[in-house]
Image (cartoon, coloured by chain):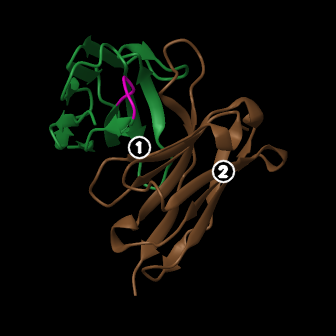
Amino acid sequence: QVQLVESGGGLVQPGRSLRLSCEASGFSFSNSVMHWFRRAPGKGPEWLAGIGVGGDTETHYADSVKGRFTISRDNSKNTVSLQMENLRGDDTALYYCAREGYSSGKCGAFHIWGQGTLVTVSS
Amino acid sequence: DIQMTQSPSTLSASIGDRVTITCRASQTINTWLAWYQQKPGKAPKLLVYKASTLESGVPSTFSGSGGGTEFTLTISSLQPDDLGTYYCQQYSSYPPTFGGGTKVEIK
């Protein structure tokens, strides 16, 4: 079964760190471009970071998280992670991982998503 | 960043109705547009990519059209399973950006 399962969310104080993980199954993870998104209440999804099949040499970040968040992958565990530092109240959201499409016309769209993990930043 | 604007933000319709959701880009994106459906507590689901190509397994009651800066998602005959929130997303340039969503309710 093709699926992505996120974990690691929770309640964290402002200024602290949190590491999210996303485990993939049912498809070729090592050949997949993977991304992290979040959706705050009442808003549309926000793209945060992406990582190519080459790993750490192929990463991209949204300006809103650049320097605070780090995306990484472990192909031996079919896992993509998001390390989040210096968390703020406006980082409170549901965080999702997704696989980017690879066929013609679909590169840049996201065709497999997890159900998300909730991160709440509050004192 | 390219801004994506959806309308309406909420839509209430009856079973069998034809429903249209509009998405406007702040600059031209050719046809690099995707539509997603999200039900409460569920993962987003890709419905349409390249503005008008239906993802495998998506019912033919869904269709996408448009290009440049104006796009529409149409449900030809609304079904109970279609309730949820719909998002458009451009992938013409980085960063990929989404509309604010259209919540579809059943009357």
Which residue is denoted by mark 1 in the rendering? Answer: B38
Q: The brown chain is which one?
A: A
Instruction: Give the magenta range.
Output: B90-94
- Give the crowd class for mark 2: few <14, some 14-19, many >=20 residues within 10 Å: many
Is residue A15 rendered magenta in the image? no
Query: Residue B28 at x, y = what percent?
Result: 23, 18
Chain letter of the residue beneath label 1 in the structure image: B
Residue at 54 percent across and 52 percent down: it is: A115
Q: What residue type is labelled 2?
A: Ser
Q: In this view, does A31 lie above or below A116?
A: above
Horizontal side of B85 relative to A28 (left or right) equals: left
The residue under label 2 is A72
* Chain for disc number 2: A
Res. B10 visible in picture: yes
Q: Nearer the viewer, residue A50 or A107?
A: A50
Give chain B's shade: green
Q: Does label 2 lie on the same chain as label 1?
A: no
Q: What is the magenta segment's predominant secondary structure?
A: loop
Please report the residue visible at 45 percent of the width from the left and 60 percent of the height from the top.
A94
- Quadrant position of residue B2: top left
Left or right of A16 on screen, residue A121: left
Eye-nearest disc, 1 or 2: 2
Mark 1: which secondary structure? strand
Number of marks in picture = 2
The answer to which of B13 and A68 lies nearer the viewer is: A68
- Closest to the observer, A39 or A63: A63
The amino acid pointed to by label 1 is Gln
Residue drawn at the location 22% of the way across and 23% of the way down = B18
- Neighbour tally class for label 1: few under 14, some 14-19, many 20 plus, Cα within 10 Å: some
